Amino acid sequence: MSAEKSTLLSRDDVAELYRRPLLDLVFEAARMHRAHHDPHQIQCSTLISIKTGACPEDCSYCSQSAHHQTDLEREALLSPAKVVAAARQAQQNGADRFCMGAAWRNIKNNQDFEQVLAMVKQVKELGLETCGTFGMLDEQQAKRLRTAGLDYYNHNLDTSPEYYGEVITTRTYEDRLRTIQHVRDAGMKVCCGGILGMGESEDDRIGLLHQLAIQNPAPESVPINTLVPVAGTPLAEVPPIDWDQVVRAVAVARILMPHSMVRLSAGRAAMAESTQALCFLAGANSIFLGDQLLTTPNRKQNADAALFQRLGLEGIATNSPTAVVEV
């Protein structure tokens, strides 16, 4: 079953796929993955927080929300020089895509935005793919980011439309979809996924995957995150999601969005290597390098190198199909 670019895909179709016997589902996803990608290659990105904390949004999972009492130290917007230095280091460490995140509800047309545009331009000039996540943005802001050289814009749906209000109340699902449309209209690629393990039901996970798959075209990058509980947030005590649910989500994403890069993202540091291996088999073909993802921990780079060696995987720069990344 391939549903890319299909608005006829029903939620029941996704539910039937998601609930197949796990090994059958992984087998089908692996077959789909091999039809469209080299199964031995993993794309590697690095993510940096360019402005940390004091976000007016009330996302229940986030340490950066001003609504929660966490130990996070707030930081002002980094200078373009510091961001470019971090990008150079990431490039030396094997990343080919550099992702910048700012804890904003939305972009404002002020000096901070001009600084972000400068960062994007200078990082792009290094030869890296660029990705940004700066909150909601309008049509003109999206066009300016594209002109500056932004390749991808990340704006996750997080969960199903039905469960969304249980996690976030300061913006709507429609707000998120509107921003994604502005990104698409500006000619940027879309990075859009969600977070598993926030107390949602299996049906909510199915609803999230359905919403991702009916985008036309499908997101070029689909991050599959699992909740990283943070003390002081409303979801701090939520128990970990079962490993098979993560594998199912990756497999369904691969089958429904065969050409997309499916990224095993936040939460990987706490994930068993056997679970990661199943996810790679089921079609995950992108990860983040580096010890930290914005404000949450990530796997150590030497641990990734050892895992890749055991599994016969290699990190590959997407903008250079023959360049092997030493993770």
Image (cartoon, grey):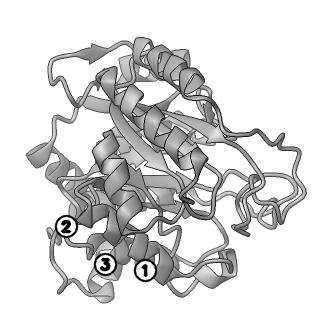
* Any part of residue 300 in sight: no
The amino acid type found where label 2 is placed reads: Pro
- Give the Cα separation between the discs numbered 3 and 2: 17 Å
The amino acid type found where label 1 is placed reads: Gly
SS for tag 3?
helix
For the point 47% across and 73% down, the residue is 176
Q: Quadrant of the C terminus?
A: top left
Q: Position of residue 222 (x, y in %)?
A: 36, 55
Q: Is residue 217 left or right of residue 245?
A: left
The crowding category of the residue bearing disc 3, from other C-alpha atoms within 10 Å (few below 14, some 14 to 19, many at least 20), is: many
Give the mark nearer the N terminus: 3 vs 2. Answer: 3
> What residue did someone put label 3 on?
14
For the point 83% across and 66% down, the residue is 67
Q: Position of residue 155 (x, y in %)?
A: 46, 60
Give the mark nearer the N terminus: 1 vs 3. Answer: 3
Mark 3 or 2: the one toward you = 2
Q: Position of residue 89 (x, y in %)?
A: 49, 14
SS for tag 2?
loop
Q: Are marks 1 and 2 in contact (CB under 8 Å)?
A: no
Q: Position of residue 305 (x, y in %)?
A: 45, 17
> What residue did someone put label 1 on?
207
Quarter residue 257 falls in: bottom left
As drawn, 41 above or below 70: above
> What residue did someone put label 2 on?
217
